Amino acid sequence: MEHQKDSKESFLKERASSNKGLLAKYVFFFCAILSIVITGAIIFVLLSDAIVFFSHISPIAFFTGTQWNPLIKPEHYGVLPLITGTLTITLGAAIIAVPTGVLTAIFLSEYASDGFRSIVKPALEILAGIPTIVYGYFALVYLTPLLSGVLPTIRTFNALSGSIVVGIMIIPMVSSITEDAMNAVPNSLREGGYALGATKFKVSTTIVVPAALSGIISSFILAISRAIGETMAVTIAAGKYPRMVNLLKPDEAFLKPVETMTAAMVEIGMSDVSGQTIAYKSLFAIGLTLFGITFLMNLISNFIKSRYREEYE
Amino acid sequence: MNSKSVSEGKVSRWEGRLFYILCFLATLFGIGALATLLVYVFWDSIGWVDWQFITSSPSRFPAQAGIYPALMGSVFVIALVALFSLPLGVGAAIYLEEYAPRNTLTRIIEINIANLAGVPSIVYGLLGLAMFLTLFNLEDGTVFVGSLTLTLLILPIVIISAKEAIKSVPDSHKHAAYGVGATQWQMIRSVVLPEAAPGIMTGLILALARAIGETAPLIMIGAATSIYSAPRGIFDMFSGMPLQIFAWSDLPSPDFQHGVTPAGVVVLLSILLLMNSIAVFIRYRFQRGE
């Protein structure tokens, strides 16, 4: 009798605690589903205001217009100057970060001693952790005056110093993902190369790099997507001068000020436009374009990366 | 035939040597850029970072300018972001690691979190602007709205690092808890969470360090770039250190460009260094405990 009561009590306690467990599970599920809600909310707010914008300015005029001037009458809402501005910065940043990042990764994964690696890797992580506003300030106040010693025609605000600092800040992204991909290449492949008499250089460039290629490419895409969305460094250093950039004339493109999509958003955000104007709605049209491009690139990058994981693990 | 292969050997030796130097120089480039940036900024800030600078309000006279309101603004916002993002991030991580069935919904959630971490920060600013200011009609530029916006921004990073921490709890410990009759919730509460706590905290602090350097999303939700009094409550207007640095870097006077602004940068970087040191310290203690 006594025993039965005991077990009944403990059974009830057990049920109570499993109810608590069920509640906990639902709370945690809500937290996890919140990330889907955030994505949904981003898409919803961007779309709903962008649709209002596109009911005033046709998408064709927006995507093919060559003049951007939302704040002073007569307003023009052609996004091409901003897209070419972003392209200029991104191209310059990629030219710096892609080769530097890959060569750094090869050095760290194939050549460097453990001691050297344990110092350099945290230092590169610091590079990624410095706020972008600091890079912008560095580019404007130190880098541009330095560059003007070599390139006298460079303007105070220019695409070159902006793309150099963006390039520097995405190096760690390229190098760390690339290095991970190279570390995942099995040693047996390297040893096979050595057994055939290949040098370290040949093994690195003709065996390790091709075997890690999908990881390397996914790091490029991720880093370039980061450069496209980069805001403060380019707002401060590259200026707020929307113009059609001709990348076929590099001096024209890089030594003069440009305005990126992100810088244009900051400019409108800091002005005192009210919530119902077309200029305000244009924020969301640019935002949607930016979100669309970067989200697609991140998706592709993750897809490529998950494929290479399956190959070796 | 023989001499050809000898010369080939020479070429490939040179080739290898050259490639090694190239890789080494590339590695030095990143490190050199970091060193250059730090040396310039710290050199210019000498004589400007002092007690007066840390305790004063911004001023148009360089000698009287200070960072106090922006510093307090950043501290307020970060505290609130920590409060919001810790339970949400850990909750999502627990669900995904301990409860989630292996189905399509779980896979979509995980891919989505990875993608959210790559969304440009200014887009989160637009989300905050449209949702908190326009839709919920909250007042713009307050600590509360700034914190909510930055919480959305770092939540994916907090979830990803908390998941890693929870994953690293050994299965044997979990089985031991089940063995003595614990329910799943009891096991999570008494085994998983305590053991994952240092890893979770490390990840949270690093995510907060990212949030404290953010500028663009705060501009979009109407935070002040320069403000004269520190916030007293969560519904007060605020400015943050990066916003104040942005305002200063716009001023052409050399005393601002080579004095006040680098001083602000040094204060910001020092706080980041402090946060990173705490994170490293927690990780170190945890590793020793293992």
Image: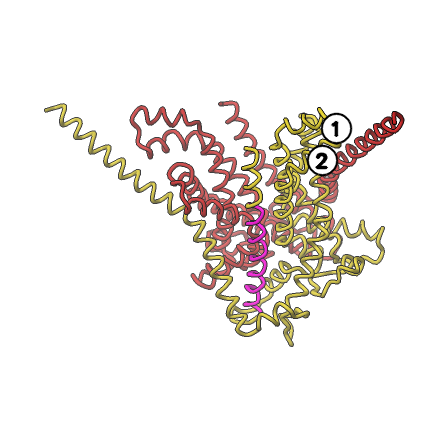
Chain colours: A yellow, B red
Q: Chain of mark 2?
A: A
Identify residue type, mark 2.
Thr
The image shows residue B281, relative to residue B96, as above or below, that is above
Part of the protein shown in magenta = A279-302
Q: Which residue is mark 1?
A: A198
Secondary structure mostly seen in magenta is: helix
User: Which residue occupies 44% across, 46% down?
Assistant: B84
- The residue at the point 72 percent across, 26 percent down is A196
Q: Element type at marker 2?
A: helix
Label 2–label 1 contact, CB within 8 A: yes
Q: Nearer the viewer, residue A121 or B143?
A: A121
Membership of A296 in magenta stretch: yes
Q: Residue A228: within the magenta?
A: no
Label 2 sits on residue = A206
Q: Nearer the viewer, residue B17 or B289?
A: B17
Circle 2 residues within 10 Å: few <14, some 14–19, many ≥20: some
Q: Nearer the viewer, residue A215 or B243?
A: A215
